[in-house]
Image (cartoon, grey):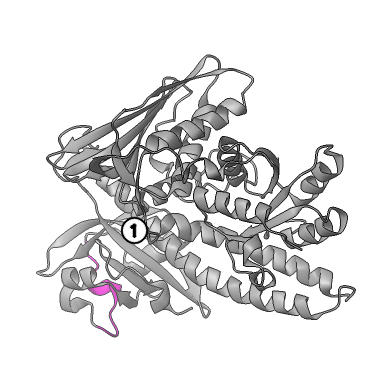
Amino acid sequence: MKVDALFSLENAGWPALVVDGLGRVHHANPLAGELFGSALKPEGSQLSEIWSAENPLNVNQFLTNWDLSPSPTFPIKLQSVGGAASSWLAAISAFAEAGQKYFLIQLLPENASAAPATKNQAPENGLLHKQKLDCALQMARTVSLDFNNALTGILGHTSLILNKIEPAHPWRGVLLEVEKSAARAAEIANDLGAFSRQEKESRALHPGNLNPLLQQCVKFFHQDPTPDPIKWSLQLERKLFAARFDELKMQQVFLRIFENAVQALRGNGRISIQTRNVELGETTQDLNVRLVPGAYVCVEINDNGCGIEPEVLPRIFEPFFTTKRGGNHRGLGLAWVYGILTNHGGGVAVSSQPGTGTSVRVYLPAEKTIVKDTGPDGPDLAGTQTVLFVDDEDSLLTMGQTILSAYGYRVLMANSGQKALDILGRNKEPIDVLLTDLVMPGMSGRELVEQVKGLWPAIRIICTSGYAWSAHQSNERAYLQKPFTTQELLRKLKQVLAAELA
């Protein structure tokens, strides 16, 4: 991985530099070149050449002190073209390449102000907060791409060796552990890349109505009641504008928001969901969300839970930040929400007061047309069979149960291969389909499939993964590539149930 490959901020709306530990500038994006002019020569530039004497430390002292005590942002002053000192808030991160340490310095205006706003005015640091999030997401995306490329090579070679060696080979167990660890790391890299993508959705999106999707998500929480009953209230706009969205990803957005709301409640909990059409004739700011003139669908979720502490609220969308304990919480939940909505051209704003509850407002660009959504492809996709859904990600199990239950299927869930075997062993009624992820810690999906085929040969099997596994490419009818939509899942299930699979 070269420094130039890591540095992917050429089109960023803020200046950015890569410097080494001695203060030599190895890369500057075009905006930095415009601001600092000839002081940043193509070769041999020094950060000291644009470093203002008004800074309390020189360049070497600054980098050394930051390395000893890192801080996410730090105020500095630099000499712009013409010699005037300008104030910046430097977002700094360090990385190493070929034994050499480098610093990525992204420069944000010290007193960033939002564009003209008319209501829900952003605080003074609203735009700055958004810029910091965008910096973090951009960096996460770059790292995830290089990291995932390396892991794909490891997984590919390991799988090749596993397919060639005998089952009783003494090194097979070690290679399986390597494969599991690399696959798990690749999942994390994929998560990073998925929510941090800056480009808009590449999948062809068709106009749809968000109301039925919200009703499905709420229905799931009714099926899984909490010890303290929750009062759900839906106020849905009957003539809601049409928005273009990926159904699966938008389900994940609302399920994660609802899950957070449920966890924030105590006794006598209330969650209200409202959809409404928004038409803007001028630029409007809702906290960190800047809405240009046009039509939008707004989904507002309010709860009367414990609220969010003021020191926590600015960080809720940051990657890897979480207040939840336990190794399964990687702090990607709300960062994923932010990334999905940004990729759809929308945004999310959160306001909260400790002890009084939280309000989440989701905005999606809309068309001023009405779509009556009766569900994908009508009743032909419904079924009554029993499906065992296996995945180590609880959010995907939630999504699967929500979709399949809504179409009449009986759904059993397991978050590991061993739990799936336990369910199969004790279940008295026949299970028609096993739908399993291939990459899971402990027992992999491939190992689970091998055991199920030997013990319960009549069960139909669908394998799913974010990777194309050659072992299943010869039987595409039994493979479902992630990410998949509701329609793709239901059609694949119908296809497998109707087919004579070996």
Res 234 → quadrant? top left
Q: Would you identify the image quadrant in which residue 473 lies?
A: bottom right
For residue 380, side relative to residue 335 (left or right): right
Point 81% across, 45% down: residue = 424
Q: At x 64% / y 39%, what residue is drawn?
A: 409
Q: Secondary structure at mark 1?
A: loop
Above or below 89: residue 145: below
Answer whether residue 46 is magenta in the image.
Answer: yes
Identify the main secondary structure in magenta: loop
Check residue 139 for magenta coloring: no
Using the image as rendered, state which of residue 19 and residue 485 is in the foreground: 485
Q: Is residue 275 shown left or right of residue 213? A: left
Residue 220, position as x, y percentages in the image:
56, 32
Q: Is 484 or 176 nearer to us in this picture?
A: 484
Find residue 168 and report its image quarter.
Answer: bottom right
Residue 51 image position (x, y, % from top left): 25, 67
Residue 61 in view: no
x then y, percent, for residue 299: 35, 34
Q: Is residue 167 visible?
A: yes
The number of callouts visible is 1
The quarter of the picture where the C terminus appears is bottom right
What residue is disc 1 on? Answer: 200
- Residue lying at the far left in this picture: please name it: 82
The residue at the point 23 percent across, 69 percent down is: 32
Residue 128 location (% of width, % of height):
28, 48
The residue positioned farthest toward the top in the image shown: 268
Q: Residue at x 40, y 59 (%)?
A: 203
> Residue placed farthest to the bottom in the image?
43
Left or right, 500 with reference to 148: right
Q: Which residues are magenta?
A: 42-53
Type of amino acid under label 1? Lys
94 is higher (above) or lower (below) than 223? below
